[in-house]
């Protein structure tokens, strides 16, 4: 995403300067500096009933003229029912439900349902992955497109677009992080690579246009979230800036207030975000196995230098895919 924002910022300003330089007779000697806000996270123990070995004593009949009184009923003639003859139901005969029989639910085992649950699950997955203390390999592929749709000096549009193609480059990079740090890349941090850079994900339900989650049948599930449309604006006259709050809570949109161009005054700039899409696949531990961020945008700006003015309109977007191996 970083490269996408860099090019958009350069286009916004480079096109401005190109046209201004053309109208003034020369564009040589003008340097462009752009600052960014982002970088790049019991076995059953059944009892055996006891057998009563007492037998009823045998009586020897007496030769008597009296009526023989039947022997009194004795417990030894009819063994009393006891717990050994009829084992009482206990937890060993019917094993109690425990965590071994029914595995405890973990972060990734329950598929979230409804926008509120999905938003919470997404934030947790991003933040828990950023804080992962083990070893994880991350492969990022980033693609982008940008086009100058219009500018005040219209006949320069095609020429500037050709120049843009030389500025656009895709990203294909890999890192291995242990406890969030890649020792082989100057201590690069997973927290800075995974969007939003250098901060936690704090997406709110109010920022979501739609959200779904599906079970992948392999112990993972995938959430797809589309953000509401937002706009960022910068007014050079007042210095006021309006940032796309919901986008900023999960991705790294262009910060118009950080543009610094020597000899040029940016009088106005704006950028529209019609609907950023987030697609996150989460494993049984609640960690990301894949993340896709699609960030379409369009906008433009106005500036002046030495009394000359130029307006530009641009469109395009960036798409970043991250794959995680633990």
Image (cartoon, grey):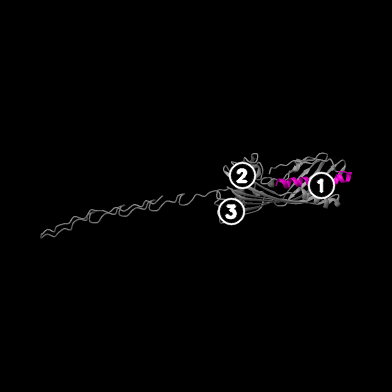
Left or right: 40 with respect to 283?
right
Residue 106 lies left or right of residue 256; in this view the side is left
Q: Give residue 219's position: percent from left, percent from top.
A: 55, 53
- Tell me the CA gap for discs 2 and 1: 38 Å
Pick the front one: 116 or 196: 196
N-terminal of the two: label 1 or label 3?
1
Local crowd at mark 2 within 10 Å, few (<14), some, or many (≥20)?
many
Residue 89 tag number: none
Question: Camera-side residue: 300 or 32?
Answer: 32
Q: Which residue position holds label 2?
A: 176
Residue beneath disc 1: 15
Percent coordinates x, y for residue 171 in the rendering: 69, 48
Q: Is residue 23 magenta?
A: yes
Residue depicted at 61% across the width and 44% down the height: 176
Q: Residue at x 85, y 47 (%)?
A: 19
Q: Secondary structure at mark 1?
A: helix
Q: Nearer the viewer, residue 305 or 99?
A: 305
Magenta span: 1-26
Please name which of the two marks, 1 or 3, marks the residue nearer to the observer.
1
Q: Main secondary structure of the magenta part?
A: helix
Spot the residue most to the front. 184
Could you tell me which secondary element the residue under label 2 belongs to? strand
- Res. 222 visible in picture: yes
**Residue 134 belongs to magenta span:** no
**Mark 3 highlights which residue?**
221
**Residue shown at 79% from the left, 48% from the top:** 300
Q: Is residue 296 visible?
A: no
Where does the image place residue 89, in percent across and percent down from the top left? 37, 53
């Amino acid at each position: 995403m970083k490269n996408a924002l860099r090019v958009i910022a350069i286009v916004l300003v480079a096109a401005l300067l190109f046209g201004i330089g053309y109208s003034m007779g020369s564009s040589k000697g003008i340097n462009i500096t752009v600052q960014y806000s982002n970088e790049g996270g019991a076995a059953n123990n059944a009892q055996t009933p006891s057998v009563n070995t007492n037998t009823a004593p045998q009586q020897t009949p007496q030769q008597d003229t009296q009526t023989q009184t039947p022997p009194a009923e004795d417990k030894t003639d009819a063994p009393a029912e006891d717990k050994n003859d009829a084992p009482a139901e206990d937890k060993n005969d019917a094993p109690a439900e425990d965590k071994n029989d029914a595995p405890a639910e973990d972060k990734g085992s329950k598929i979230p349902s409804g926008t509120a649950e999905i938003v919470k699950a997404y934030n947790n997955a991003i933040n828990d992955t950023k804080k992962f203390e083990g070893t994880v390999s991350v492969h990022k592929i980033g693609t982008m497109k940008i086009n100058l749709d219009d500018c005040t000096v219209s006949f320069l549009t095609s020429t500037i677009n050709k120049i843009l193609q030389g500025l656009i480059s895709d990203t294909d990079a890999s890192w291995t992080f242990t406890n969030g740090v890649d020792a082989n890349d100057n201590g690069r941090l997973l927290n800075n690579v995974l969007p939003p850079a250098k901060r936690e994900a704090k997406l709110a339900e109010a920022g979501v246009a739609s959200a779904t989650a599906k079970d992948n049948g392999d112990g993972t599930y995938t959430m797809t979230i589309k953000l509401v449309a937002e706009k960022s604006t910068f007014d050079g006259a007042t210095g006021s800036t309006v940032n796309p709050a919901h986008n900023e809570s999960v991705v790294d949109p262009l910060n118009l207030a950080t543009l610094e161009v020597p000899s040029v005054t940016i009088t106005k700039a704006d950028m529209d975000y019609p609907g950023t899409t987030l697609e996150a696949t989460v494993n049984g531990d609640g960690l990301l196995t894949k993340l896709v961020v699609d960030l379409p945008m369009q906008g433009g700006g106005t500036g002046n230098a030495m009394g000359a003015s130029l307006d530009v309109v641009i469109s395009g977007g960036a798409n970043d895919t991250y794959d995680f191996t633990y």
